[in-house]
């Protein structure tokens, strides 16, 4: 049972150099920012004058944030 719990909840955060709740917080903040960017893109689709760069700015910022903290991507081992 302990192995299953480790595999489901702890293995991936550990591989990212984080603890479980640290990883959860990062993922939730990251996902929230993606939702804001997605909503901006939908708004822009309806009313092109609105949110002209918000979605692309969000994608660029998230990409930069992820690459700064991802040891796997920084080592060139991204799958």
Image: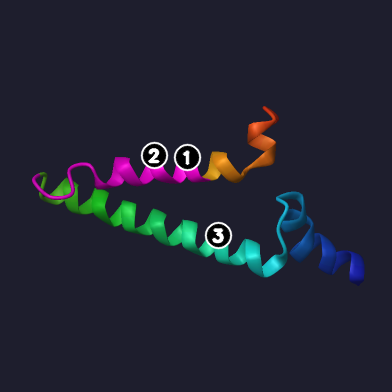
The mark nearer the N terminus, 2 or 3, is 3
Q: Foreground residue, 79 or 15?
A: 15
Q: Distance between the residues labelled 1 and 2?
A: 6 Å
Q: Residues within 10 Å of mark 3 (few under 14, many from 20)?
A: few
Residue furthest toward the top? 76
Do the residues bearing badges 1 and 2 touch, measured as CB atoms within 8 Å? yes
Left or right of 68 in this view: 71: right
Q: How many marks?
A: 3
Q: In which quarter of the image is residue 25?
A: bottom right
N-terminal-most mark, 3 or 1: 3
Find residue 41 and report its horizontal and vertical position in percent. 25, 48
Where the C terminus falls, by quadrant? top right
Q: What element carries label 2?
A: helix
> Where is mark 3, residue-wise?
27
Most frequent secondary structure within the magenta stretch:
helix
Q: Is mark 1 on a helix, strand or loop?
A: helix
Q: Does the magenta stretch include residue 22?
A: no
The residue most toward the front is 68
Give residue 38's mark: none
Q: Which residue is drawn at 67% across and 27% down?
A: 76
User: Where in the figure is residue 7, as x and y percent of width and height?
Assistant: 82, 60
Residue 40 in the image, given as x and y percentages of width and height: 25, 53
Q: Can residue 26 be seen in this view?
A: yes
What whole-number distance in Å separates the C-alpha atoms at marks 2 and 3?
Answer: 17 Å
Instruction: Give the residue number, with chain letter if any, for mark 1.
Output: 64
At x 64% / y 65%, what residue is drawn? 22
Residue range (magenta): 49-65
């Amino acid at each position: 049972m302990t192995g299953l719990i480790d595999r489901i909840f702890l293995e991936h955060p550990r591989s990212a150099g984080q603890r479980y709740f640290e990883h959860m917080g990062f993922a939730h903040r990251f996902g929230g920012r993606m939702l804001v960017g997605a909503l901006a893109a939908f708004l822009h689709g309806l009313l092109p004058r609105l949110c002209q760069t918000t979605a692309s700015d969000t994608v660029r910022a998230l990409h930069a944030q992820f690459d700064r903290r991802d040891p796997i991507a920084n080592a060139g081992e991204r799958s």
